[in-house]
Amino acid sequence: MATEDTDTGPWSDRGFALGGPDELSEREQAAVEACLRALADDEFVLAERYTEWQVRGPTLEGDLAVANIAQDELGHARLWYDLLEDFGHTEPELIWERPPEDFRHATLVERPFARGDWADAVVRGFLYDEFERLRLDALADTEYPRIADRVGKVQGEEHYHREHARNWLERLAEGRGDPDNGHRRVQEAIDRLFPHALTLFVPTAYEPDIVEFGVRPAPLSELRQAWLDEVVPVLEDFGFRLPVAADAHPEAVDTLLPTARGRDGEHTDAWADLHDEFTFTYRQLDRSEAPRLMVDPDDADEGGDHP
Amino acid sequence: MDLSTVKERAGPRQFGPTDDMPREYREAATRMIQFHANSEIMGAYIERPFVRQAPSLDRKLAVSAQVQDEIGHGQLLYRAAENLGIKTREEMLDELAAGEGKFLNCFHYPLGNWYELPMIMFFVDGAAMRRQATLKRTSWEPYAHAIDKICFEEGFHIKHGEDILRELATGSRRDQELLQRAFEKWWPRILQFFGPTDDQSTHDDFSQEVGLKTMSNDDLRNAFLNAYLPKAEKYGLEPPEYPRVEYHEDRDHYEVYEEDLDWDEFFTVARNELPTGRGQIDKRRRSQDAVAWVREAIETTPASGDTPAAAD
Amino acid sequence: MIFEVFRQETESDYHEHVGNVHAPDEEMARLFAQVMHARRKPANSLWVVPKEEISEVDADDPGVAMGGTTQKAYRWATNYSTGRMAEEIEASEAEQVEAEARRRSTRSEGGDD
């Protein structure tokens, strides 16, 4: 019954198995929240890392583009956190006062960048954006109307991100200039990041409910296979080695996973520092609320963000 | 075109790349626009830690967008300077990295904390806006063109700066105290933004004669104080006793007491020799150098086989 | 490489030159141009042209008499007198409000964004 619907208009042309935020059972709400936390935290933390390239990008134009992508991702995080606020959570509870171990993002997005390692940003973007497309496609079929309402908006910006990542990947892979640089650095980034990218697909205890209730009808295991089918051949065509074949047995893929898997609250060391940095001013100001500058997403016009 | 013709014809947006401008004009314009472009980059550089440290999602988005805009302004301005045929953008960015590029005094000091941020985002950007508005009438057309877009974007920066200022000024007593402390720290630097009052700047007269500048530093400072001192007062900020600033109603003029300001430091800054400024320059250079390999990777023509991108 | 960028605000507008981008090739130039020149002002289309591919006829060139001057018309007013409080800020804001209104009306008319 769920049709591809990226229109942000009324939901009336499509039935939903789940109701609004007030109409969910306890189990349904827990599944919706778990799904949203992974979504929101992934986008927020990835954006946080991307902003490190501001004023440090390889060219002025490249700097502007990555800043834009960071803002897009932050905007997406804002949309998803806002849906968690439906359940009574506030922005400080969701971000600024939340202990680091309560964040549910994959470890891929929290890894620090080594100075000047643009290949890391490119590979990370590529691995993440291909995952993000699959996840959003799956969410387009959600049974939860509040998510359905916003998927189209987010999808609208992801195309640029994928183009951006693929174009950079291609140019670095071509190994112009000193071939040792582009190609070697991309290969190193793949070696380092691929296991962390796999944490994007690590299911939480809520996964069976998320699928059963149709919050995200496609299971993560299915998304992972689709993702491997997409990213592995692309990278291999550029002459890169991957730790696993696209058609490897799922158990063989599982063995590549790092110890910390993010989704269960266990993170890599870099996360504590990052968390400490981005909550610094909030703590210094001794705040209990986070100032809003824009109207609530529900009250914003199509694409509008001016009060 | 000879210099006397330039001075005769000098007016808003009078000259462009197709005009045969004398070297003196092109050099003066390059110096001025390069300074402006460098300032955008270094301004972005001192603001960038607050993308990470912003205390709410919306503030983070706004600070990120501001830093992004500043880099965009740098892009537009380097283009306007490049068109003068004296230096390429790469040369100007290299000079900045090497510590040879000059930029605004205020951007030689790092921002200590969130309370100091509106000192840049509101007062310094406000002062810059004051100057930029007059540059819409500069004689080098590509410069004016860039200024158009900069002014279009910059208004939001100052409004956001003011919003942060308002939040802190109406916050707790501690907020107000820390804000006042930040104001006292930055106020003398802000007063020096427009340079010495008696115009020790040697390039000034020439720039005005050929229409690159349309207003003296003194008039700009005065206009700035007229607009922004009442704003400071509105938010309960008290200018420190020194440097003294006196308003003379008869002439509608603010007198800034030169001798109360540290001009040795100002000229140390101007030579890029202030340790904190030097630190900013060097840190930025290291991050530029670290991605030199990327620029190389995308700008070198493929060694074999591939057809270059340019069409035949 | 340097690419010159021309922005068209709505379908019924001309493309106007808005600046350039430095990029390794046309594909990347198109990506960069979207952010550099169409992130804040509305754009229906961008032309991204290799700088060296542009040839120019200038009104002052020998034998050319097009009746124009090198000056161009610009969208925003430039009469900024001094004296009033932070007038330039208000002006900048007014420009942004106008651009935003245009962006919205373009969206609701156009349909196919």
Image (cartoon, grey):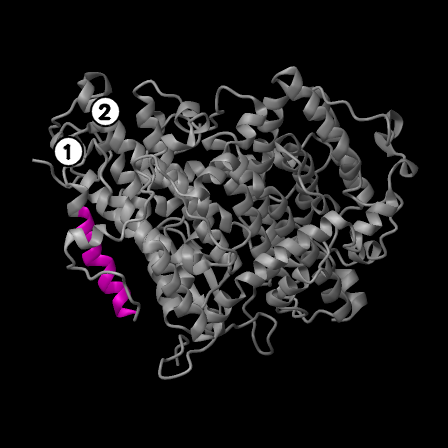
Whether labels 2 and 1 belong to a single chain: the reply is yes
Screen quadrant of the N terminus of chain B:
bottom right
- Residue at position x 19%, y 55% from top? A252
Q: CA distance from mark 2 to mark 1?
A: 12 Å
- Look at the picture and state if A274 lies above or below C63: above
Q: Is C62 or B262 nearer to us in this picture?
A: B262
Can residue A230 be found in the magenta stretch?
Answer: yes
Mark 2: few/some/many CA within 10 Å (<14, 14-19, 20+): some
Q: Amino acid at mark 2?
A: Ala
- Residue A208 is marked as 1
In this picture, which residue range is highlighted in magenta?
A223-238
Q: Chain of mark 2?
A: A
Q: For mark 2, what is the residue?
A: A30
Q: Is B216 or A217 nearer to us in this picture?
A: A217
Q: Amino acid at mark 1?
A: Pro
Residue B172, quarter of the rendered image: top right
Disc 1 is placed on an element classified as helix
Instruction: Name the N-terminal-most of marks 2 and 1.
Output: 2
Mark 1: few/some/many CA within 10 Å (<14, 14-19, 20+): some
